Image: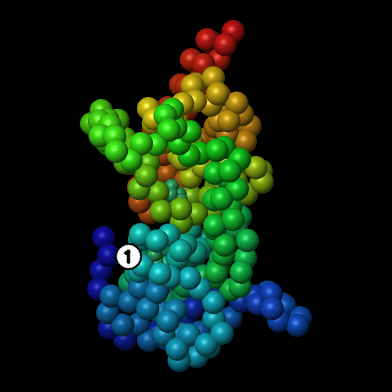
Amino acid sequence: MSRASPAGRRLTFEIFRFNPQAEQPQPHMQRFEIEETPYMSLFIALNTIRETMDPSLQFDFACRSAICGSCGMMVNGKPSLGCRTLTADLPDLIRLQPLPVFKLIGDLSVDTGVWFREMAASSEAWIHAKQAFNPNAAEERMDDELAATLYESDRCIECGCCVAACGAARFAKDFKGPAGLNRIARFMMDPRDERDDSDWFDVFATEDGVFGCLGLMACHDICPKELPLLEVYAYLRRKALTTARKRD
Ligand code: SF4
Ligand code: SF4
Ligand code: FES
């Protein structure tokens, strides 16, 4: 549980710096010291550093409430959301680095959008509708339990923390990653999608899909939205097995 900061703590931040626009860009770590304030989040700390010490510091925040997914960063080696990480839960020395795997924009800012777009495009993880859209038709009902399961998967904010924590995603460029497997499972379960298990099999039952997963569950431990990723992989593995049997 988060606690209020003890008064008077002086925090040292070691922050990764890299500006690809510079004439001779040199990645390095830079130290900043600031006074901790009560309930200080990394969002507040980084803004304090940018406003009082270095206006060139790059980092991303938008919603400040774990909704937009833009503030993922490595906090003392662990992928975390900067907006919901309190300095009170961290030691005096706080080391911040950009998330690996994603394209680096500068300092702590990465482009997760390219990775998520390519992942979605390679798996066509969106509804392939059975019927043409009719704006005048009554809304179709969906089974309550299924709707709740889809809602769980839809809670993903595409922050990239699980991908940064995933050894397989770091080494295999085309691995769909935890967020990708979650997205695939979400559309596989959707009754409005026209693709059957056999169509999906070639998308997820591969080395870039669920069989590329090492199963150590760092993604499950790290996900700030606590998505049930363990259940997602179990669902995909069961589907792979039953579909392979049917195909034989
Ligand atoms: S369990 Fe699989 S998807 Fe999750 S971090 Fe490990 S290798 Fe990646
Ligand atoms: S599954 Fe969790 S950690 Fe991964 S992108 Fe979605 S919200 Fe972030
Ligand atoms: S700023 Fe939106 S999730 Fe952190």
Q: How many marks?
A: 1
Display coloring: rainbow
Instruction: Give x and y (percent) for residue 227.
Output: 37, 44
Instruction: Give x and y (percent) for residue 7.
Output: 27, 83
Q: Which image quarter is the C terminus in?
A: top right
Label 1, on which residue? 65
Name the secondary structure under disc 1: loop
Residue sitting nearer the eye, 51 or 36 = 51
> Residue drawn at (58%, 81%), measured in percent from left and top?
30
Q: Ligand 3 closer than 8 Å to the CB at disc 1?
A: yes
Instruction: Give x and y (percent) for residue 193.
Output: 44, 30
Mark 1 Cα shell of 10 Å, populated few (<14), some (14-19), many (≥20): few
Q: Is residue 199 above or below residue 134?
A: above
Q: Is residue 56 above or below residue 104?
A: below
Instruction: Give x and y (percent) for residue 6.
Output: 28, 78
> Residue drawn at (54%, 19%), measured in percent from left and top?
198
Quarter location, residue 39: bottom left
Q: Residue furthest bottom?
A: 52
Tag 1: residue type?
Ser
Q: Is residue 64 above or below residue 152?
A: below
In the image, taking residue 214 as reference, residue 18 lies left or right, namely right
> Residue drawn at (37%, 44%), measured in percent from left and top?
154
